[in-house]
Amino acid sequence: MVSVLVPTFQHVNYISTCLESILCQKTNFPYEIIIGEDESTDGTREICMKFAEKYPDKIRLFLRKEEDKIYINGVKVGRFNHLENFKCARGKYLAYCDGDDYWLDENKLQLQFDLMQKYPAANLCVTNTYLEKSSGESAAALVKAFVINTPKNLRNTAYLGHISTWFFKNDVTDFIKNKIVYKAPVMDVILFAYLKNRGNVISTPETTSFYRYNNGGLYRLKSVKNVHKDRFILNWLIFIHLQRNPVIFLRNLTYLIWRYYLNFIK
């Protein structure tokens, strides 16, 4: 019924915790774990192989190759690994957890599965998450009550929650074929833009995941200026390929220009 997608690369200190948190899920339905290991050199691959050997009924491990990685804006990224995980998934629903994050609630999958079954018009279910900061842990409040948003309600929302909490219908064929996924500097923002336009979005206040502030991650290695540049690119790509709404595009562009002025010019 559910495929849990776990892309991982250079996560030797985190991947065991991630996989254990998924394996301990209590459900009344079968689920599989799709691990895409992107040819790590720090021991991550060996750990994944041990887990796959120990839990052959749950885990399907795919060992990606270095030569399959693609470049986006001149930077080698793991986008191929992420997209191949989507293609391998057999579940009616998909859940997501990067190899350096983990789940806190053993009932996460059952909670979201039940909600999606109860509200068939929904395409995505999001919960709260804990965010790890460099100065310690802090709770990031997403919602204080159960809410169902329509695509119209979310047309001005660029991102909701964190991808480690997302639970959505396995209806992403058009997404993985879209040219935007081979151009966008980050994938979760464009995935949200795609999902929110294909049905309602359920937000529920339970806290089910932990997002690590991984300084070794590709995004964390970018300068503030390059992160801001990525946001300009994302805004344009979403307008061109997913959401041709000039009002939203111009408003987002105005906001980004203002932030750029405050950070780098003023």
Image (tube, rainbow, N blue to C red):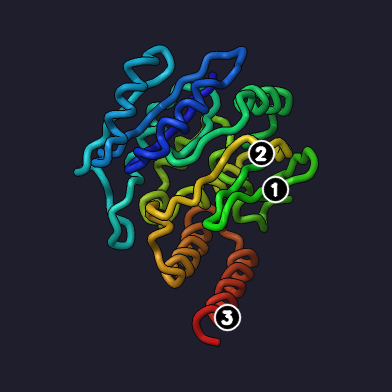
**Sequence order check: which comes first, mark 2 or mark 3?**
2
Specify the quadrant that holds the N terminus.
top right
Element carrying mark 1: loop
The image quarter in which residue 123 lies? top right
Question: For the residue marked with disc 1, what is the amino acid?
Answer: Leu
Q: Nearer the viewer, residue 182 or 74?
A: 74
Taking the spot 73% from the left edge, 39% from the top edge, the residue there is 205
Q: Residue at x 61, y 40 (%)?
A: 198
Dot 1, how many residues are within 10 Å of its Cα: few (below 14), some (14-19), or many (20+)? some
Residue 20 visible in the displayed image:
yes
Q: Which mark is residue 127?
A: 2
Up-down relation of residue 201 to residue 53 (above or below): below
Mark 1 and mark 2 lie on one chain; the one further toward the N terminus is 2
User: What is the distance, in whole Å, between disc 1 and disc 2 at their CAs?
Assistant: 7 Å
Farthest bottom residue? 266
Q: What amino acid type is highlighted by mark number 2?
A: Thr
Q: Report the residue marked by disc 3.
A: 262
Asked if the residue under mark 2 is in contact with the one under mark 1, i.e. CB atoms within 8 Å, the reply is yes
Q: Earlier in the sequence, mark 3 or mark 1?
A: 1
Assign the C terminus to one quadrant of the image.
bottom right
Q: Left or right: where does residue 133 sit relative to residue 99?
A: right
Q: What residue is at 49 percent from the left and 51 percent from the top?
A: 213
Spatial CA distance of label 2 from label 3 is: 32 Å
Can you identify the residue that label 1 sits on? Answer: 142
